[in-house]
């Protein structure tokens, strides 16, 4: 079968790599793809939201299945458009993806369906928002309603910080339309984990949990990023907490979306926090997490294309997992998540140890030379039966970037914390 993957990040490189190992896949395409995928897939320069061009390409090339990676094309209605043309596509419609596209919608959805999450209110008026913050006190969390590439959340330690955040969003237009509504929610204390599931209607097939590291510096210091590394599974996460999250969060969410006429097919992502009262939702996403996918797919034993077909048909994909541990660290451009340069030369990746894998996130081929073209550039991962061995391999892999002033990375990922 011919398969098209829409997207260009590390998540999509991982999806392409996993699909490349499927016996059913004869040809792979990525739109637009990145510099690391070229060995596995034909990269076609079509933007992820150019719906008509994507459909034209899928018909012309007789693509059998399309996988949509990122949230932006999902919310732009790429899946709706493919379905209308009777093309096989894996991902939620834009109506179902609203669970990620609007935090205000997600919060009222959770309230209506009894899904545990922090108490919150939504505001469009800055003065009313400020009065609410003053009354609530800090710490408190301010979130832009719409998509903001993981940067629309401010965990404010003081009332002043929270007021600045709402002013930036509601008055300063920091995130444009995405910040014209703000959700202000109670601060929750606890360890975070990401639990995803393949979903079709009310069928829920959970994946192994993973932990993302969103802060830029070691020991979870500094500003939030798109994610600086991840590991899976999580050694200190009890099975009872996972079971609780499946039965009290993922299953009611899938059933609730069906009830609201927004039946979800694809990967539903719950960003969770383990509180003293059990797991609570920080956010829902309508897609695979990035960089969680880069550690979860290497542990999946099934053929991903078969899983897509089974889930879509309403069958149990019978997921099976390697008895192993995966961890990986993001190599970011200097300055990220602030301003950074592009076109940075990438060290010779053939020097990497043989027991690590390298996923490309922001790279491109420029006249035969591999250069960066984003803030998060590469992901160095390793899978081992034993956690210490996986961590050791990644550490060795990171050495080729150690003295390179163009890049930075965290050194504390994968220890199980
Ligand atoms: P999000 O983009 O919604 O995943 O939020 C980014 C990060 O902000 C999360 O990974 C958490 O670390 C933090 N965060 C978001 N909401 C809360 C909350 N209610 N309480 C504590 N931390 C939060
Ligand atoms: N890793 C968080 C996300 O994909 O949104």
Image: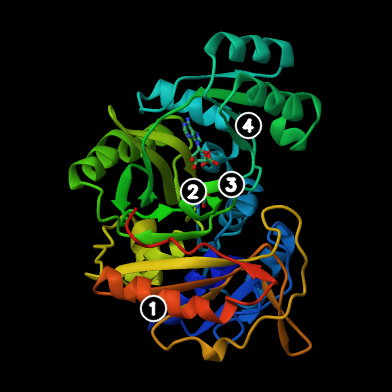
Task: Please report whichever mark, 2 or 4, sits nearer to the chain's N-terminal start.
Answer: 4
Gap in angstroms between the C-alphas marked 2 and 3: 7 Å
Q: Position of residue 73 (x, y in %)?
A: 64, 53
Relative to 383, residue 169 above or below = above
Relative to 260, residue 33 above or below = below
Q: Position of residue 147 (x, y in %)?
A: 64, 42
- Reading the image, the residue beneath label 4 is 145
Task: Please report whichever mark, 3 or 1, sits nearer to the chain's N-terminal start.
Answer: 3
Q: Which mark is residue 222?
A: 3
- Reading the image, the residue beneath label 1 is 393
The crowding category of the residue bearing disc 1, from other C-alpha atoms within 10 Å (few below 14, some 14 to 19, many at least 20), is many
Would you say the residues marked 3 and 1 are in contact, meaning their CB atoms lie under 8 Å apart? no
Task: Please report whichever mark, 1 or 2, sits nearer to the chain's N-terminal start.
Answer: 2
Q: Nearer the viewer, residue 174 or 197?
A: 174
Q: Position of residue 309 (x, y in %)?
A: 38, 65
Would you say the residues marked 2 and 4 are in contact, meaning their CB atoms lie under 8 Å apart? no
Q: Which mark is residue 220?
A: 2
């Amino acid at each position: 079968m011919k398969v098209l993957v829409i997207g260009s990040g590390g998540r999509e490189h991982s999806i392409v790599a996993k699909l490349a190992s499927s016996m059913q896949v004869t040809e792979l395409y990525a739109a637009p793809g990145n510099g690391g995928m070229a060995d596995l897939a034909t990269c076609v320069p079509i933007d992820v939201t150019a719906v008509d061009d994507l459909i034209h390409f899928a018909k012309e090339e007789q693509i059998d299945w399309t996988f949509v990676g990122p949230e932006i094309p999902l919310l732009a209605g790429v899946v709706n458009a493919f379905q209308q043309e009777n093309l096989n596509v894996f991902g939620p419609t834009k109506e179902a993806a609203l669970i990620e596209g609007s935090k205000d919608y997600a919060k009222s959805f959770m309230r209506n369906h009894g899904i545990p999450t922090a108490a919150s209110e939504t505001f469009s008026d800055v003065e009313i928002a400020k009065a609410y913050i003053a009354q609530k006190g800090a710490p408190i969390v301010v979130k832009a309603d719409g998509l903001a590439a993981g940067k629309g959340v401010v965990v404010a330690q003081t009332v002043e910080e929270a007021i600045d955040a709402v002013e930036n969003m509601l008055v300063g237009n920091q995130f444009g339309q995405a910040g014209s509504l703000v959700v202000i929610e109670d601060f929750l204390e606890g360890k975070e984990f990401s639990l995803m599931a393949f979903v079709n209607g009310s069928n829920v097939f959970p994946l192994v949990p993973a932990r993302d590291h969103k802060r830029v510096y070691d020991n979870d210091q500094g500003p939030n990023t798109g994610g600086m590394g991840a590991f899976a599974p999580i050694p200190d996460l009890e099975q009872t907490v996972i079971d609780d999250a499946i039965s009290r969060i993922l299953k009611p969410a899938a059933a609730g979306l069906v009830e609201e006429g927004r039946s979800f097919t694809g990967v539903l992502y719950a960003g969770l926090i383990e509180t003293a009262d059990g797991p609570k939702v920080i956010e829902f996403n309508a897609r695979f997490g990035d960089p969680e996918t880069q550690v979860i797919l290497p542990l999946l034993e099934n053929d991903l294309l078969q899983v897509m077909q089974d889930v879509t048909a309403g069958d149990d994909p019978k997921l099976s997992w390697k008895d192993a541990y995966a961890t990986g660290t993001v190599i970011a451009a200097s300055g990220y998540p602030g301003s950074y340069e592009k076109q940075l030369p990438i060290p010779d990746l053939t020097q990497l140890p043989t027991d690590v894998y390298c996923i490309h996130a922001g790279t491109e081929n420029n006249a035969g030379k591999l250069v960066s073209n984003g803030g998060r550039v590469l992901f160095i991962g390793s899978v081992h039966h034993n956690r210490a061995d996986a961590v050791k391999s990644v550490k060795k892999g990171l050495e080729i970037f150690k003295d390179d002033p163009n890049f930075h990375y965290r050194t504390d990922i994968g220890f199980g914390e």
